[in-house]
Image (cartoon, grey):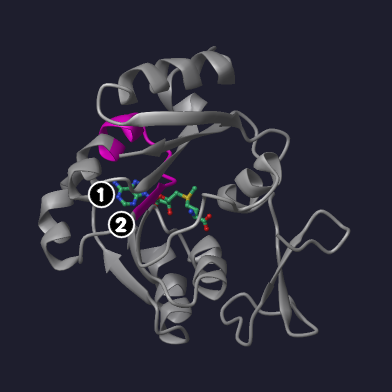
């Protein structure tokens, strides 16, 4: 993991559209305050065991900010990026136009079976969807993964319940997930993302 001394990660990159103005000396600066994957890498001390190898499924791709860095970091990997908002998708499509390894899917992640038939079996899952049923959405994708895949759930505590601490919400989510996969680690993403945590699992 390379850093620039100002809290940013740096990733070799040649093209930044639509996130203009961040290219510097052939690298882009990746902010852990804007990306939960970057925040997770900062909190765990690097990307060891966190990145995909062949085929990644990314749920809640938004405008493609994190997906663009992931695509530059894992050039050999194909990233299937699911996003339901047509507004966010406009930028995601621009990002994908300039990178052959991003495959956008404009779809509702609550309906996995409507698009997973078009996705080659992923060996990595990352979900960043701030919805009440975030745990259920994550669980509904586990059966589509290769065995021993890494599956990372970003948990927004406020979407689950008001008044829970991060640790309590992470423990409750870990209990629910552990019936279906192995929860290796739970990580609070503070101070980068308030009231967010991550569960790193293997299936
Ligand atoms: C926190 S943002 C994602 C930010 C993005 N992961 C990044 O780091 O660049 C969450 C995204 O999930 C999307 N989302 C919410 N519910 C969804 C659903 N049911 N299916 C697909 N995407 C959904 C939202 O439209 C939003 O763009």
Q: Is residue 111 above or below residue 85?
A: above
Q: Is residue 104 above or below residue 122?
A: below
- For image coordinates 44% across by 77% down, the residue present is 76
The answer as to whether callout 2 falls within 8 Å of ligand 1 is: yes
Which of the marked residues, 1 or 2, is nearer the chain's N terminus?
2
Q: Which residue is mark 1?
A: 109
Question: Which picture quadrant has residue 89?
Answer: bottom left
Q: Quadrant of the C terminus?
A: top left
Q: Which residue is mark 2?
A: 84
Asked if residue 142 lies left or right of residue 33, the reply is: left
Q: Residue furthest right?
A: 5
- For image coordinates 32% across by 20% down, the residue present is 176
Residue 171: where, in percent of width, then height? 47, 16
Q: Secondary structure at mark 2?
A: loop
Is residue 131 one of those drawn in magenta? Answer: yes
User: Magenta part of the protein: which range?
Assistant: 124-138
Question: Which picture quadrant has residue 104?
Answer: bottom left
- Label 2 environment density (alpha carbons within 10 Å; few <14, some 14–19, many ≥20): some
Q: Quadrant of the N terminus?
A: bottom right
Mark 1 vs mark 2, CA separation in Å: 7 Å
Asked if residue 166 lies left or right of residue 178, the reply is: right
Asked if residue 47 lies left or right of residue 101, the reply is: right
The reply to whether discs 1 and 2 touch (Cβ–Cβ < 8 Å) is: yes
Q: Is residue 65 above or below residue 99?
A: above
Residue 51: where, in percent of width, then height? 49, 57
Residue 177: where, in percent of width, then height? 32, 26
- For image coordinates 60% across by 86% down, the residue present is 15
Q: Nearer the viewer, residue 136 or 45?
A: 45
Residue 156's tag is: none
Viewer-nearest of labels 1 and 2?
1
The answer as to whether callout 1 falls within 8 Å of ligand 1 is: yes
Residue 149: where, in percent of width, then height? 33, 48
């Amino acid at each position: 993991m390379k850093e620039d001394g100002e809290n940013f990660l740096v990733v070799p990159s040649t093209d930044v559209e639509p996130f203009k103005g961040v290219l510097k000396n052939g690298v882009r600066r990746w902010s852990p305050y804007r990306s939960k994957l970057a925040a997770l890498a900062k909190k765990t001390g690097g990307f060891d065991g966190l990145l995909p190898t062949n085929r990644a499924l990314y749920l809640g791709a938004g405008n493609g900010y994190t997906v663009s860095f992931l695509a530059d970091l894992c050039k050999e990997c194909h990233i299937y990026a699911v996003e339901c908002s047509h507004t966010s998708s406009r930028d995601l499509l621009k990002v994908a136009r300039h990178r052959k390894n991003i495959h956008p899917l404009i779809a509702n992640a609550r309906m996995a079976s409507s698009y997973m038939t078009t996705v080659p079996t992923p060996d990595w899952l990352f979900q960043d969807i701030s919805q009440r049923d975030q745990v259920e959405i994550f669980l509904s994708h586990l059966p589509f993964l290769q065995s021993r895949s890494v599956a990372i759930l970003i948990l927004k505590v406020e979407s689950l319940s008001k008044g829970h601490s991060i640790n309590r919400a992470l423990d409750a989510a870990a209990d629910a997930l552990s019936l279906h996969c192995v929860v290796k680690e739970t990580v609070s993403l503070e101070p980068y993302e308030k009231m967010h945590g991550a569960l790193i699992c293997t299936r």
